[in-house]
Amino acid sequence: MNKPSLVVLAAGLGSRYGSLKQMDHFGPSGETVVDYAIYDAIAAGFGKIVFVIRKHFEAEFKEMFGPKMEGKVQVEYVYQELDALPKGLSVPESREKPWGTAHAVMMAAPVINEPFAIVNADDFYGRSSFQKIHDHLSTLNNEELSACLVGFVLENTLSDHGRVSRGICQVDENGNLKEIIERTHIFKKENVGAYFEDEGVKTELTGKEIVSMNLMGFTSVIFEQMEEAFAKFYKEQSGHPKAEFFIPTTLDNVRKSGIKVPVLMSEERWFGVTYKEDKPIAQRNLNQLVEKEVYPHKLWP
């Protein structure tokens, strides 16, 4: 069977960060956050990296990542643009915002014919997270619809500097997903716990909830289902210029179809860069991992 592939969601414009964080420097030798994800993915056994990017920063992105990957792993680039839509659909006049994470994943369909995992370009997941999902994907029959999720503890994934988006999960006694709901306005409380806001209403969270950080896996059969689901989303939401087609919705659709979706719990401590103020924290965390010799000082010789 072909080795699993890794789809890197790197098309974000970094509106809250203020720049293209997927190309900002965080490691001691100028590494990006996604460099560490790719390094861990290669070590875990992934055979191909698929970058989902935008055309307008294509040259700069390829110049940064192409030489690092050469001779180490197969690399593909695909593009998330507003007009990259299924046949028969067009961009509404009011639409400026990207269509969302699930739409970004759909862009990888032409280059994926094996089980694959998804990661955000601005999140650090830890080596064991990649090993867990790789090992699970390696057991799947790619001709059958299947999915999995790496779960993290909410309190380990919050920012001190503002709201974050997380897929909040309910898990059954056998470790399978019962429900996942994307919450786009989750805030850390001053002392313990968190809360999310929805249309002005605050809902308390303990901080112990299991959440998705978009580290999910699927067999490539999922692309057919995604295109159908996007067509439905477009029909219902195209008049709402900020509505997004989220990847947790795709995962939950697999569950709703009667297929068990295992949640592979990660013991890693996540960190990411949603805001500019998160950068020194990410740099400090990466330097500590280098000092502990988890990673070399220079990731790519």
Image: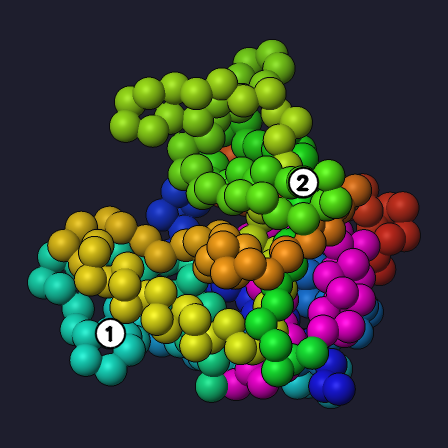
Magenta-highlighted residues: 111-140
Position of residue 205 relative to residue 57, above or below, is above
Q: Nearer the viewer, residue 44 or 16?
A: 44
Position of residue 39 relative to residue 247, above or below, is below
Residue 69 in sight: no
Quadrant of residue 229 within the rendered picture: bottom left
Percent across and percent down for residue 193 are 59, 19
- Residue at position x 75%, y 86% in the image: 1
1 and 2 marks in contact (CB < 8 Å): no
Q: Nearer the viewer, residue 40 or 7?
A: 7
Report the disc number at residue 172. Answer: 2
Q: Earlier in the sequence, mark 1 or mark 2?
A: 1
Where disc 1 sits, the SS reads loop
Which of the image's four quarters has the C terminus? bottom right
- Residue at position x 14%, y 54% in the image: 239
Position of residue 14 relative to residue 222, above or below, is above
Q: Is residue 61 left or right of residue 292?
A: left
Question: Can you tell which of label 1 and label 2 is closer to the viewer?
Answer: 2
Percent across and percent down for residue 148 are 65, 59
Quadrant of residue 106 within the rendered picture: bottom left
Q: Let me know if residue 123 is in the magenta part.
A: yes
Q: Residues within 10 Å of mark 1 (few under 14, many from 20)?
A: few
Report the disc number at residue 292. Answer: none
- Residue at position x 66%, y 27% in the image: 208
- Residue at position x 46%, y 30% in the image: 186
Q: Which residue does the numbered mark 1 point to in the structure image?
A: 83
Q: Is residue 128 left or right of residue 137?
A: right
Mark 1–mark 2 Cα distance, whole angstroms, equals 39 Å
Percent across and percent down for residue 293 are 90, 52
